[in-house]
Amino acid sequence: GMVRQWQEAFYGERYSCSNMEVGKPDFVKLAEAYGAKGMVIESRDELKDAIAEILAYDGPVLVDVRVTKNENCYPMVAPGKSNAQMIGLPERSKIEATELMYCTNCGAKNIASNNFCPECGTKL
């Protein structure tokens, strides 16, 4: 998860409280205890059918989606950074418009039809 990823990337692999294997509840039983449907998804191959089942169910659903221990989360926000400074965002295509404006907050180029800066979210 994100906490383990932070500990790996920013804190020299000093892990604390990020081993979720020990003491993890049975989320299906937990959901059922509250009158909800509980499901476990073990692999990506199960996602499409599971999502269809979730959407078709008339009531709350708690889904335990299993990922590998070392799976990383992207984009991610580094400790002490803002959402505008996310790491791992896909590269944006170059702006090819004749009329450009610059964001007053971060200075990013924006096409004139944008209402908000896609880099920092400031209203243009």
Image: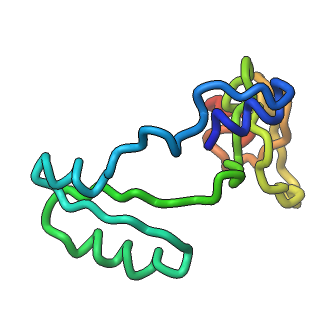
Relative placement, left or right, of 123 versus 6 is left
Quick one: quadrant of the C terminus? top right
Q: Is residue 46 above or below residue 19?
A: below
Measuring 79% from the left and 40% from the top, which residue is drawn there?
87
Measuring 47% from the left and 74% from the top, which residue is drawn there?
47
Q: Quadrant of residue 106?
A: top right
Q: Is residue 104 above or below residue 116?
A: above
Residue sitting nearer the eye, 25 or 81: 25
Relative placement, left or right, of 32 versus 119 is left
Relative placement, left or right, of 65 versus 86 is left
Which colour style is shown?
rainbow
Quick one: quadrant of the N terminus? top right
Q: Using the rendered image of the protein, determine whether residue 26 is visible from the camera's viewpoint.
A: yes
Image label count: 0
Q: Position of residue 5 (x, y in %)?
A: 72, 39
Measuring 13% from the left and 67% from the top, which residue is drawn there?
58
Q: Using the rendered image of the protein, determine whether residue 124 is visible from the camera's viewpoint.
A: no
Residue furthest out toward the front: 22
Q: Position of residue 103 (x, y in %)?
A: 78, 31
Q: Position of residue 71 (x, y in %)?
A: 69, 54
Measuring 59% from the left and 38% from the top, which residue is drawn there?
19
Residue sitting nearer the eye, 9 or 100: 9
Residue sitting nearer the eye, 32 or 10: 32
